[in-house]
Image (cartoon, grey):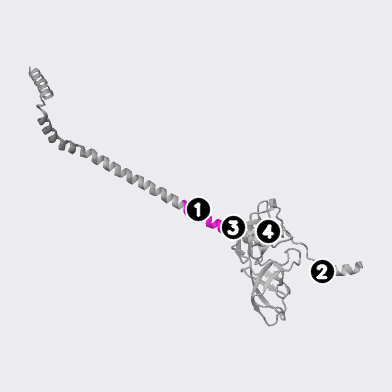
Amino acid sequence: MHFVIAFTLAIALMAADHYGQLMGSFRSLLLTTISPIERLATLPKQFYQLTTTDFTNIDALKLENQQLKTELLLVKAKQQQFSNLQLEVSRLESLLGTAGKINTQSLQIATVTYYSNNPLSQYLTLNKGQLKNVVEQQTVIDSKGIMGQIISTAPTYSRVLLITDPDHQIPIRIQRTGQRGILSGTGHETTQLEFIPKNSLVEVGDLLESSGLGGVFPAGYPVAVITQIENKNGNPYLDITATPVADLFQSHKVLILSQATPYLNFDEDLTESSDVK
């Protein structure tokens, strides 16, 4: 019964509102009253969306910042590599400048892979060996001068005895005067010039170059510079110390020269020519 009365009343109100707009004012009042409640009800959802958006933006910014840091690190790494390549090009240009002065010797570039610097043994290891036709007694130089000679080889590497090794000797001549002598290693990054008489016109700063005697080292390559001269009583020869011009323990790229042409004795050649006549 109550349901029928309520249903009839609802139909009557709907008809009256449709035809007479009787409920318009009441609806407006009702909507005005309910609107703040609806807005209040949506606040939690809006707050959640706002917070979620902020956290999402923060995460995106963090990710972007991390990507930028990574890219910056890569750029710096490439910059370092570029700087290293520039230095490598400079070194190779220096080597090629040296190579341009070589007329009769074949050569190849090698990389230093190891070095030993102690008083008993001073040597380098190179990354070229028998497979690259490297043989014993070949001369090794850098862009400044002679470093030493090949003393042993393996298929993929070779060992260079440095001119500062105590067992190493190289025939030299004083460039300024042409006087010859023997330069021996001391084991302490210096060399000793031997067999130079006291009356010799030798001076500090004189450049010592390979003489070509012995047929091992090619003639005319810088070897060392005289840094100290002592005249000891009772010794017929001067005590001369010389410093190598090559960067023995700094050079990364070196040149391996072919074996030198045997030294030509022009006096013997002239004698033989006279005998033929």
In the rendered image, which residue does mark 1 sit on?
78
Counting residues from the N terminus, which is met first, the one under dot 1 or under dot 4?
1
From the top left corner, tell me how far across and down residue 189 is, in percent: 61, 68
Q: CA distance from mark 1 to mark 4?
A: 31 Å
Q: Looking at the image, is mark 1 or mark 4 nearer the viewer? A: 1
- Amino acid at pointer 4: Ile
Q: Residue at x 65, y 59 (%)?
A: 96
Is 93 contained in the magenta span? no
User: In the rendered image, which quarter is residue 122 located in?
Assistant: bottom right
In the rendered image, which residue does mark 3 sit on?
89
Q: CA distance from mark 2 to mark 3?
A: 42 Å
Residue 54 shown left or right of residue 130 in the figure: left
Residue 72 shown left or right of residue 29 in the figure: right
Q: CA distance from mark 1 to mark 3?
A: 16 Å
Q: CA distance from mark 2 to mark 4?
A: 28 Å
The region drawn magenta spans 74-86
Q: Nearer the viewer, residue 176 or 202?
A: 176
Q: Residue at x 9, y 19 (%)?
A: 8
- Amino acid at pointer 2: Phe
Counting residues from the N terminus, which is met first, the one under dot 2 or under dot 3?
3
In the rendered image, which residue does mark 4 sit on?
256
- Amino acid at pointer 1: Lys
From the top left corner, tell me how far across and down residue 26 is, in percent: 10, 30
Q: Give the class, few, some or many, for how many residues have Cα within 10 Å of label 4's Cα (few <14, many ≥20).
A: many
In the rendered image, which residue does mark 2 sit on?
266
From the top left corner, tell me how far across and down residue 97 is, in percent: 65, 61
